[in-house]
Amino acid sequence: MHILIIIIALLALAYFLNQAKQKNMLSTEEKPLPAAAHDAAHQSHLDRVANGQTVAFISEGKLFYRAAHGEVKQLHSPYVQEMLDKMEKHRERNAWKQNTSFGVSASGAMRQFDGDGAHINATAMQFDEQGRILYFLQDSGMGGLFSYELETGVERRILHRQNLALTDMNLDQASGKLLASSMNKTGIANLVMLNREGDDYRELTGGDTLDTSPCWIPNAEKQVLYQSTGIARNQSGVALAFGNASIQMLDMKTGSVSPVLDDPAYDYLHPRVCQQGNLHFIRRPYEAPKYETSNALLDVLLFPFRLLRALFHYLNFFSMMYSRKPLTSASGPALNADLKEIILKGKRIDAEKALRKENMVNGVPSLVPASWQLVSRNRQGLETVLATNVVAYDMRTDGSIIYSNGRGVFLLGNGRQSSLILKSELVADVIAQ
């Protein structure tokens, strides 16, 4: 009897152990990953997606792009190379003037004939639906719109005019209409529209303002959003200060302009609308210009030194003209542009200080503070901060967003996670395909 009870107990124990083992195996198969492991797996997937992005960006007036799973390459414009070749010939013709009185400028410094004074800058880029890059180049007197075939390297000049300066291009691929901001020598900027072939050029806005960053509103015929900043001038017409940047909407049917976002405490920059109708923009605190008593006292204290410096340069000019010898041992060559102080979105940035102080994004230092936020606003007015330390961003056709903190380009994923696409010394504007 006792033996029978022991056998039954052993069989029961074996049964329960077997059931527990099967349950454990089942739970192991169906058990979700721990939060950390899940996040790591999602980040790994996001990294793979980021590596497959084709992007372009502007850095110090130069064009760069990176094909999917490729390396960053500079886009060398044949037009720019042609201009550089002409300047080289000009340098050779004027080489005999070096170190003579003919090579002295009105400031007393030696004129440069080596071509380094040539500044042909890229101010805007845009991918079209065929994978080509549209971009705008300008120097001190001319400006032109070009297209570039990435596969063949063939460049086509679309539009070329004197005193033409376009920025912030935005292409409506369906209609072929191109929005841009046209900079004027008087310091104002108006919105313009033209087609991708350079025809039908016309101005959309006017007034003493800076109207920039235009974009089309999806599924809204002839309605445009843009960023607008007022200009304060003195009686002589000299610009003294700029107001806060607001977002305005232009109805091209009626010509009416209505405010969308305007707050004296903030700048609202670079509006874009996704296919779901949500408004995206960069928000940063508005810094009103200040001139305090301390500034006036500093100017008074520095006035004698500034006067002496002006007198020195005046005498240095005559010394160079008549003795061909400067009053200082410094040769005074043209300095190469560095990244100590740069201007991003109209703000002067101390890059050296920012790289020490500001937050990092995926290990990449930021050139702008965390108060520069990428914000999404839905139709009900609910705002969500998607990312911080944002200099520029663009929206892809699938709704995903790429953005830059000034030193890197990132893909923004769900849950506000970001993954690094590329790094560069300076990213002033970024464009997604």
Image (cartoon, rainbow, N blue to C red):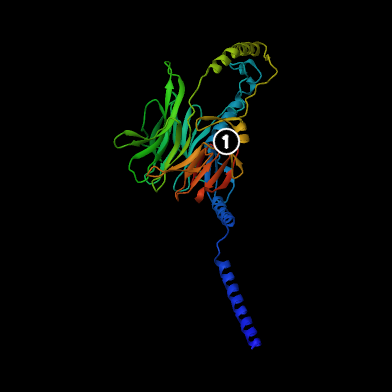
Residue 150 percent across, percent down from the top left: 52, 46
Residue 76 percent across, percent down from the top left: 56, 39
- Front residue of 44/96: it is 44
Locate the N terminus by quadrant.
Answer: bottom right
Secondary structure of the residue carrying tag 1 is: loop
Compared with residue 60, is residue 18 higher up or lower down, i.e. above or below?
below
Residue beneath label 1, please? Answer: 367
Residue placed at 61% from the left, 17% from the top? 104
Residue placed at 63% from the left, 23% from the top? 95
Compared with residue 35, is residue 8 higher up or lower down, i.e. above or below?
below
- Front residue of 142/344: it is 344
The residue most toward the front is: 1
Residue 189 percent across, percent down from the top left: 42, 29
Which amino acid type is marked by label 1? Leu
- Front residue of 259/85: it is 259
Is 232 on the left or on the right of 116, as rendered? left
Compared with residue 413, is residue 310 higher up or lower down, i.e. above or below?
above
The residue most toward the bottom is: 1
Residue placed at 52% from the left, 19% from the top? 292
